[in-house]
Amino acid sequence: MIVDVDTPVGPGRLTLSLTADAPRAVLLVSHGAGGGIDTVDLVALAEALPAQGIAVVRYEQPWRVAGKKVASPPATLDAGWRPGLDAVAARFPGVPLVVGGRSAGARVACRCFAEPAVGVLALSFPLHPPGRPEKSRVDELASVAGPVLLISGDRDPFASPEELRTAIAAGQAGERQLVIVPGSAHSFRAPGAAQLAAAASEFVLGLLPPQS
């Protein structure tokens, strides 16, 4: 199912992968600056999680919908994200909502984290530009007042496993978890898709209140 969303910076687009029954949770994710919603990681989530009772919604930012080749600045990405988040929350009232994305999409989810979201799934969080550790974005990660699961490749030039461990050991507003996928760089490879999806499912389901 595809749903268009009006935003102050142009139309965005939601692609919904629904559960067979009423969802136990909803995961809203967006893409990075170098691709769309058809990357290995986002597709793996959309294909695997609905069977676990988690509806997956992939959000295309307005710049992608408009066919542009260059991503918008952070403030514009944030303005394009919030109406998509509001639309998903309205479509699934009362259902626990986890937000996230890959790379730049993960940064947006961290910067804009607020209720009704209950956690963040950060795929390939770009802690810094390649070779520029002094340009740290750790503040965006640290600002999330809720649980965060980071899933990253062990060869990612935007954040090594050691750098991510150091980042999450610093003062944080909420719980942080880290999963490293062997053999993947900033873009995940197909062999790691199952591990990624399983870790994401466990994280999302772990945020749900106990069933009565």
Image (cartoon, rainbow, N blue to C red):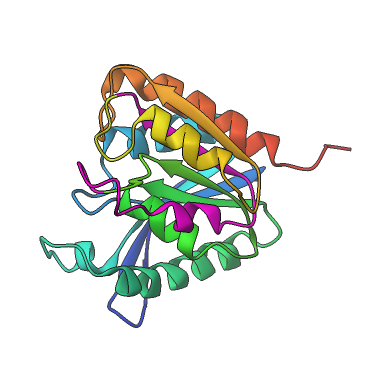
Q: Which residue does the image show at 46% across and 50% down from the upper left?
A: 100
- Using the image, determine if residue 104 lies above or below residue 179: below
Q: Is residue 53 visible?
A: no
- Using the image, determine if residue 36 lies above or below residue 78: above
Q: Is residue 174 visible?
A: yes
Q: Position of residue 201 (x, y in %)?
A: 56, 31
Compare residues 180 and 196 and report the one nearer the observer. 180
Asked if residue 133 lies in the magenta stretch, the reply is: yes
Q: Which quadrant: the C terminus?
A: top right
Q: Which residue does the image show at 38% across and 54% down from the upper left?
A: 137
- Per the rendered image, the range of residues in magenta is 129-154
Q: Is residue 170 left or right of residue 74?
A: right
Task: Return the residue found at the far front.
Answer: 134
- Using the image, determine if residue 72 lies above or below residue 43: below
- Using the image, determine if residue 181 lies above or below residue 158: above
Q: Which residue does the image show at 40% across and 55% down from the upper left?
A: 107
Q: Quadrant of residue 70?
A: bottom left
Asked if residue 209 lies in the magenta stretch, the reply is: no
Compare residues 167 and 77 and report the one nearer the observer. 167
Q: Which residue does the image show at 37% across and 77% down from the upper left?
A: 6
Q: Is residue 43 left or right of residue 138?
A: left
